[in-house]
Amino acid sequence: MPELPEVETTRRGLAPHLEGHSVRSARVRQRQLRWPVEVDFEKHIAGARILRLERRAKYLLVHTDRGCAIWHLGMSGSLRLVDADVPVQKHDHIDWLLDSGLILRYHDPRRFGALLWTTEDPVAHDLLNHLGPEPLSDEFDGDYLFAASRRRKQSVKTFVMDGRIVVGVGNIYASESLFLAGIRPDREAGSISQARYRRLAEAIKTVLARSIEQGGTTLRDFVGGDGKPGYFALRLNVYGRAGKPCRTCGRPVRDLVLGQRSTFFCSRCQR
């Protein structure tokens, strides 16, 4: 699934080509996504001027002078800009024709993504109003994590992956951040000290920022807004490396399942 860095990479790739431009028309070929695209969507967006692109968690918010389109890439979705004469491929479900002549095209083989429309503040939308702080914001730090974790029996990995605690720390980045902070992923969240949570918060910021800089993790189905895949997967320390030597100490990386998700760690480097 595209995670926060992949969505942020998409936003940065698309923003210069969308902001300030108008949508001449839209075509929805497949409405049955995770939630059906409303039947009047094309009328809402046609003629709208795009003001700015923002990201909230894994949602891409396209603000226009008429309302806001809320886009989620789901498990396998991607947004890219193509010339108007590029043939439509299977699973190309939605096109926005821009006044520049380019088309913003949404591709989603699994159809777990979503495109919603609202004329209200999108942050107040039911999908967004319960979310925790952004991990790269000043609001998120180790003191916040420490306070939120008190009396929590769940593992620290599932704790930081909870979008109500902090958004966008998906499976890959949780494993990598816990390795960088030297914390075992199966430790009880409530048992970890304030000092160690400060290290973890900094590790989360470091891992996510590094991934965004390098274009997002190379995942099988993800393609960034500029049409290029990310390269961060080449630098993963533990994720997907079970049985391979730890890059720091050489002991084989171990794996286990937490919250129904594969989890990778080094039993020597992480305590």
Image (cartoon, helix red, strand yellow):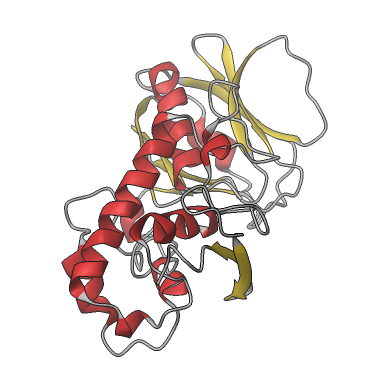
Q: Residue 256's image quarter? A: bottom right
Q: Is residue 31 above or below residue 269?
A: above
Residue drawn at x 54%, y 20% as measured from the top left: 226
Q: Is residue 82 above or below residue 181?
A: above
Q: How many marks?
A: 0
| Residue closer to the observer: 20 or 56 | 56
| Residue closer to the observer: 19 or 75 | 75
Residue drawn at x 46%, y 32% as measured from the top left: 9
Residue 257 location, x and y as percent? 63, 74
Q: Is residue 266 above or below residue 229?
A: below
| Residue closer to the observer: 6 or 218 | 218
The outermost residue toward the right is 90
One can see residue 169 in this view? no
One can see residue 185 in this view? yes
Residue 211 location, x and y as percent? 44, 38
Residue 266 location, x and y as percent? 51, 63
Residue drawn at x 66%, y 58% as measured from the top left: 242
| Quarter of the C terminus within the rendering | bottom left
Q: Residue 198's image quarter? A: bottom left
Question: Is 260 positioned to the left or the right of 11 in the image?
Answer: right
Question: Is 266 positioned to the left or the right of 67 in the image?
Answer: right
Question: Is 194 positioned to the left or the right of 79 in the image?
Answer: left
